[in-house]
Image: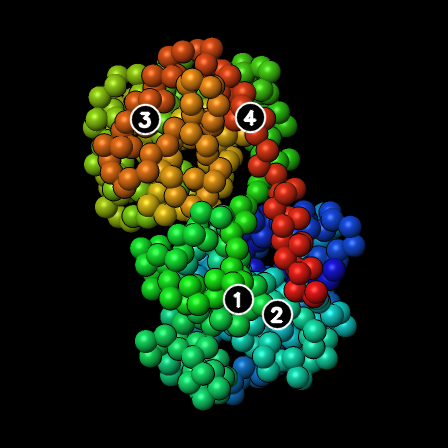
Amino acid sequence: MRILFASPEVAPFIKTGGLADVAGSLPPALAGLDGNDVRVILPLYSGINDDWRSQMTFVKYFYFQLSWRSCYCGLFELVRGGVTYYFVDNEAYFKRNGLYGHFDDGERFAYFSKAVIETPAQIGWSPDIIHCNDWQTALVPIYLIEGRTRLPELSATKVVYTIHNIEYQGRYGNSILTEVFGLDYNSYFNEGLLSYYNDVNLMKGAIMSSDFVTTVSPTYAEELQYAFYAHGLEGVVASQQHKIRGILNGIDMDVWDPSKDEKIPAKFTAEDFSGKWECKRKLQEQLGLDVNPNAVIIGSISRLVGHKGYDLITAAFDRIMANPEVQFVLLGTGEWSFEEFFRNAQSRYPGRVSANITYSAPLSSAIYAGADLFLMPSISEPCGLSQMIAMRYGTVPVVRLTGGLKDSVPAYNPDTDEGLGFTFGNINAEDMLSALDRALTVHQDTEAWARLMRREMTADFSWNKSAREYQSIYESLFI
Ligand code: GLC
């Protein structure tokens, strides 16, 4: 099949979150299945570095209309791992600091969505599927309604739309509709496609108008029926239930492999953990923690925002640290109150707490490899990739049972010696503490812990199964 995968961020070119990892690893997995021609399209941000730029070739440029604006669209191409990547060049929209958060994000990503629709005709290629992701590409199926009649390359194209996080919907006042998006008010607003309490809601439009909608874990697909998780779109989700499915994300098992990873101080395998203990010692040294092989390092790598469960961690923090063996390593940026809390905690627990209020890929690898436990008490977590990466490195997850955490971390069972992590269900600091306590108890049993680490490291988090599930959805749209 011919598949055009549209994403506002794609690893390793440019990344702010898990979406980039998925957009960087699902397309190559799909390209590995027989008979697929997979191409990925993303904006050419100024943040994409010269190493990548020097590998691109210029394809062509053209203009298209976005409302009254005639917009330049340059296309660059790069082929990597069996996938062709198209970079959409428009400096007015993408030569900016950072990816999102600009006053005209609605216009920037309407432009990108329109570029996705215009590109196939320009390159003489007719995709069977356009696979879109999150609010930034939500206008693709909407523009396709009109594009289908104008562009023969798209006359039979189907759209699959993936929700990576329903919290970010793309909501605007309805004056944006004609002036910026170039859409006719009566057809697109009055028909209920994009209208949501008198606003324009892009994610609603995509859910309504795509041929199929997926989200990134089966549990999150269930949760989206409830107001608590769906942030107002529960009714829309319920009305489209017949075409919504949850498919668990995978990770790139070659990129995240402690036996090959050049980014960590020592390599290790499920048969020989000595490299991991070396990584642990180096991590303690590097971060100014007491160098103590018996300490239990709890790692946490995330955006510091409420829905990642940091209220639970801060509420329970002093009780976590009451165990003198525990060390805590944090990496991430986010809400000011959480950043302050952890900076302060580092000075209150010298040698035992390391607060790294930044984002650093090398430090994240060092933490995945060097920590003993990985704490992820998310209030909601559509999929979550960090817990899978942690497990690859023999770092045992402690998670709340929500979304992809529930689907990827089966609870440890001491009687049968099964399971991969320590879990709790309620959004409650006491329950989180009790899961941590259970982990610390099992940690004292060196043999049981080694068996658990071995299970983590050999578990299958690859795309094999999930890529086939996407493929079967694509195929089902042509039956
Ligand atoms: C979003 C979600 C995260 C998911 C990722 C990739 O960042 O918050 O849970 O793993 O998308 O799908």
Question: Residue at the location (57% across, 37% down)?
Answer: 461
Asked if labels 1 and 2 touch by Cβ distance under 8 angstroms, the answer is: yes
> Residue at the spot x=36%, y=74% of the render?
196
Q: Position of residue 260 (x, y in %)?
A: 63, 28
- Which residue reaches farthest right? 35
Disc 4/disc 1 C-alpha distance (Å): 35 Å
Amino acid type, callout 2: Val
Residue 126: image x %, image y %? 74, 70
How far apart marks 3 and 2 lie (CA) works out to 46 Å
**Numbered mark located on residue 116 in the image:** 2
Could you tell which of marks 4 and 2 lies nearer the N-terminus? 2
Q: Quadrant of residue 431?
A: top left
> Can you tell me whether the CB of the residue at mark 3 lies under 8 Å from the nearest atom of ligand 1?
no
- For the residue pair 254 and 330, the one nearer the viewer reads as 254
Q: Earlier in the sequence, mark 1 or mark 3?
A: 1
The tag on residue 436 is 3
Tag 4 near tag 2, CB within 8 Å: no
285 sits to left or right of 475 = left
Q: How many marks?
A: 4
For the residues marked 4 and 2, what is the alpha-carbon distance in whole angstroms? 39 Å
Q: Ligand 1 closer than 8 Å to the CB at disc 4?
A: no
Mark sitting earlier along the chain (3/2) = 2
Given this view, does label 1 or label 3 mark the residue nearer the observer? 3
Residue under circle 4?
Answer: 457
Q: Amino acid at mark 4?
A: Met
Quadrant of image for the C terminus: bottom right
- Disc 1, SS: helix
Residue 259 visible in the shown view:
yes
Residue drawn at x 31%, y 42% as measured from the top left: 309
Q: Dot 1 corresponds to which residue?
A: 137
Label 1: few (<14), some (14–19) or many (≥20) C-alpha neighbours in 10 Å: many
Q: Nearer the viewer, mark 3 or mark 2?
A: 3
